[in-house]
Amino acid sequence: MNELTPTTDILQEAADCFKVARESLIVGAALLWKIGTETLWQEKHSSFSEYVQEECQISPSFAAKLIKVHQNFHLSGGIPQEQLKGIDVEKLYLAARLDMPVDQQLVRAKLLSSSEIKAELAEKDGKDCSHETTIHICSRCHQK
């Protein structure tokens, strides 16, 4: 962005950036799966975790989520990567945890919000969770 643009242009530019990012994450997930399963990281790194932190600049837990999405939807479910590219990977990860066929998980990831998917995950035998929902966190040390 070299010059000032109207707000609508800025909004569209930001949306486009994140669309490209979502698409890249799906491609990256497939690559991470290959790197992990074929231990391609061994030549230059002591662990897969070290590789993803140093080279990909992501946490091992985020890498695990991406790999789970790739395994569930593409490898196990047969969903082409092109169909996954525009969808938020966090919603795909959450939907992959739903006990239903992969095509139904995909529909939920496309149509529902993260909080709606989380609510579905929280339901058990048609009932909402019964545990206490209040969590107290210290403002100084951030301990629960």
Image: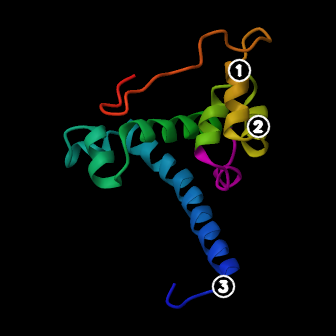
Mark 2 or mark 3, whichever is nearer to me = 3
What residue is rendered at 52% in x and 84% in y? 1
Q: Which of disc 3 and disc 2 is earlier in sequence? A: 3
Mark 1 or mark 3, whichever is nearer to me = 3
Provide the residue span drawn in magenta.
Answer: 78-89
The location of residue 4, given as percent across then percent down, is 56, 88
Say left or right for 19 vs 135. Answer: right
The residue tagged 3 is 6
Question: Residue placed farthest to the bottom in the image?
Answer: 3
> Separation of disc 2 and disc 3 at Cα?
35 Å
The residue tagged 2 is 108
Q: Are marks 1 and 2 in contact (CB under 8 Å)?
A: no
Query: In this picture, is 97 found above or below 18?
Result: above
What residue is rendered at 50% in x and 42% in y? 66
What residue is rendered at 72% in x and 11% in y? 124
Q: Amino acid at mark 3?
A: Pro
Q: Secondary structure at mark 2?
A: helix
The location of residue 71, given as percent across then percent down, is 56, 35
Q: Quarter of the image holding residue 37?
A: top left
Q: Quarter of the image holding residue 116?
A: top right
- Residue 1 versus residue 131: which sits nearer the camera? 131
The location of residue 9, given as percent across then percent down, is 66, 80
